[in-house]
Amino acid sequence: MPNVASVTAGYYRVPLEATLSDSMHGAILDFELNTVRLRDAEGAEGVGYTFTVGRNGAAIDAILTRDVPDQVIGQDADRIEWLWQRVWWGQHYGGRGGPTVLALSALDMALWDLKAKRLSQPLWKLLGGYDPRVPCYAGGIDLDFPLDKLLRQTDDNLKKGFRAIKMKVGRKRLSEDVGRVKAMREHLGDGFPLMVDANMKWSVDEAIRAARAFQPYAPGWLEEPIIPDDVAGHARVVGDGGLPVAAGENLRTVWEFKQLIATGGVTYPEPDVTNCGGVTPFMKIAHLAEAYNLPVTSHGAHDVTVHLLAAAPNRSYLEAHGFGLDRYIAEPLRIEEGFAIAPDRPGHGIEFDWQGLDSIRA
């Protein structure tokens, strides 16, 4: 029985090569990376991680360092569902979201990585195995970029092999957003997959006006038009805005996704494996979307999420943006003519440069 023998947490502050920006978080100079390394009694190791945009990483580290080990050390590492429930309910009174579920996400990811490595299988095959070639888009965090810089970034992403692009919207005046979306459409050409992301900026009525204003430029979806808590508002935006809606990167549980999907408030459910509870809930959300005949997309952690979408027959696009993490990973995500390729290495295949990360330890 592969019992968990040790739990080791890491907490790092990763600098960005360029200042990024969106409508609600403002300028982003760096991000916090939290890692967890599990070893079983035979010495095999599984790795998981989560991240924040500059705050609460210390709280996640405290949970992984002080609370999680007592709940998992000595337990059967293959009983992932049982361990997930044990940690969820063990942290429940002060948990259910925020740092607690981010810590659980990293732990669950590490458990799946450990199991796949022990079985010498890539994670996407262990999870069912659908197709290792996953459609992929470049997710720009570029709200404050001047237009010429935005277009240069787009050209750079096309050279890297991307065949779909997402840009930020949510500037002070809707007319500015419309002008930038129009310019991007003209730059990319008709029919090229272009998505727009408002990062929760608007009220429901503002989101509907924006969606209608973007319609002539045929974006593939409008992402996070309003706050994630307004389920009825999402349904109004879907019904009255005239554009598909992607949402869910700020939802923390399967049950929150169930409410949003069942109410008709989302076209592309968008879980993030680093904050929805991990691999275990992500796949449940993907299958829930499948039951409603909806495509599932993703947010963040593309090196892991490529495996999850490669196991989902209703997968849509994988979002790719690494927040500068690629320079600390041995083999970053491979893009070929618009597809991300799920690797055949055992586990999720991420090998961190631990020595390099030690130099940016928080």
Image (cartoon, rainbow, N blue to C red):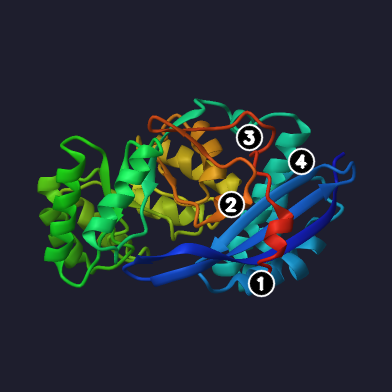
Could you say whether the residue bearing mark 4 is in a helix, strand or loop? loop
Disc 2/disc 3 C-alpha distance (Å): 22 Å
Disc 1 marks which residue?
362
Tell me the kind of residue under disc 3.
Leu
> Residue 123 got which mark?
3
Number of residue marks: 4
Residue at the limit of the structure toward the right, as seen here? 41
The residue at the point 25 percent across, 61 percent down is 169
Chain-order first, disc 1 or disc 2: 2
Disc 3/disc 1 C-alpha distance (Å): 30 Å
Check if mark 1's residue and mark 2's residue have beta carbons within 8 Å: no
Could you say whether the residue bearing mark 2 is in a helix, strand or loop? helix
Disc 4 crowd, CA 10 A, few/some/many (<14, 14-19, 20+) = some
Relative image position of residue 163 (x, y in whole percent)? 33, 36
Q: Nearer the viewer, residue 292 or 319?
A: 319
Disc 2 marks which residue?
327
Chain-order first, disc 2 or disc 4: 4
Could you say whether the residue bearing mark 3 is in a helix, strand or loop? helix
